[in-house]
Image (cartoon, grey):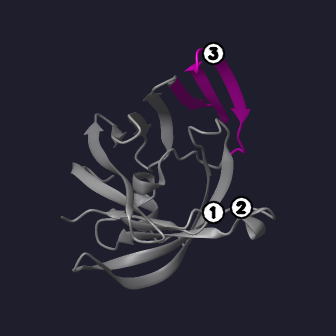
Amino acid sequence: MLNATPTNYKVLDKNNLEVKSYTLDIRTIKDSDLCTMYDEENNITRVNFSDKNGFTTKFEWRTNGMDIKGHIKNNRLYYKGNLNGESINIVIPLEEGVPFIFNTRNALTPFILSDKESLYMYVTSSESLSAYKFEATKEGEVKLKIDEVEYDAIEVEFSMAGFIGLFMGSDLLYFDKESGKFLKRVDNRREREELIDVD
């Protein structure tokens, strides 16, 4: 798994204007990677624990009006905590054999460095408190230039699995070929880009 110093990222809208920034801090604790994602603009802290394959085992969200912990056990996703003053306790069944990934930015590193061409996974978001099945597919190697720095990158198409994915469109993710580090995301649905801040 990737174990590195904190890395800064920025999000640009379709006019190339920065709309927010965050820091991704990944540290190894015993047999689990701790990925802490800070979103300073919205005062959000997301903490993810994953196994050696990058698959999530437990996570936490903390922000104004939200204090939620989640974990995966026996093909079920459990949410527990408080949301806008209300106590929540939610259980969502997951398909057996399909991993749960909290944060694609770091969790796909083992996939990038593997010989696999595609990977199905469940993902979630703090907005929906649901689980959605997605597919990541390697599209090949590309040269990627960000702020005058050139990378040898792997391009990955990331889309919702199944029939609904035909209508939802897909995003493109880019990872450093050698380290598997997340570099850039082209979010077509929201017409924005998320990329590493090399300044």
Q: In the image, which disc is placed on residue 86? A: 3
Q: Is residue 192 above or below residue 98?
A: below
Up-down relation of residue 104 to residue 111 (above or below):
above
**Amino acid under label 2?**
Ala
Q: Quadrant of residue 160?
A: bottom right
Q: Is residue 69 left or right of residue 51?
A: right
Dividing the picture into quarters, in which one does residue 191 lie? bottom right
Q: Do the CB atoms of the residues marked 1 and 3 lie less than 8 Å apart?
A: no
Q: In this view of the protein, can residue 74 be seen by the observer?
A: no
Q: Main secondary structure of the magenta part?
A: strand
At x 25% / y 50%, what residue is drawn? 3
Magenta stretch in the rendered image: 68-96
Task: Estimate how packed mark 3 is, as few (under 14), some (14 to 19) or many (20 or more) residues with alpha carbons within 10 Å.
Answer: few
In the picture, the disc for residue 161 is 2
Of labels 1 and 2, earlier in sequence is 1
Position of residue 1 in the picture relative to residue 92 (left or right): left
Give x and y (percent) for residue 40: 33, 40
Residue found farthest to the right: 163
Numbered circles on residues, count: 3
Q: Is residue 67 magenta?
A: no
Tell whether label 2 touches label 1 (CB within 8 Å): yes
C-beta proximity under 8 Å, tags 2 and 3: no
Q: Residue 187's x, y, as percent?
A: 53, 65
Image coords of residue 44 (percent x, y): 41, 35
In front: 159, or 19? Answer: 19
Give coordinates of residue 150: x percent, y percent. Answer: 25, 81
- How many residues crowd mark 2 within 10 Å: few (<14), some (14–19), many (20+)? some
Residue at coordinates 65% horizontally, 39% vertically from top-left? 128
Q: Quadrant of residue 194?
A: bottom left
Q: Identify the residue position indicated by label 1 in the image.
A: 135
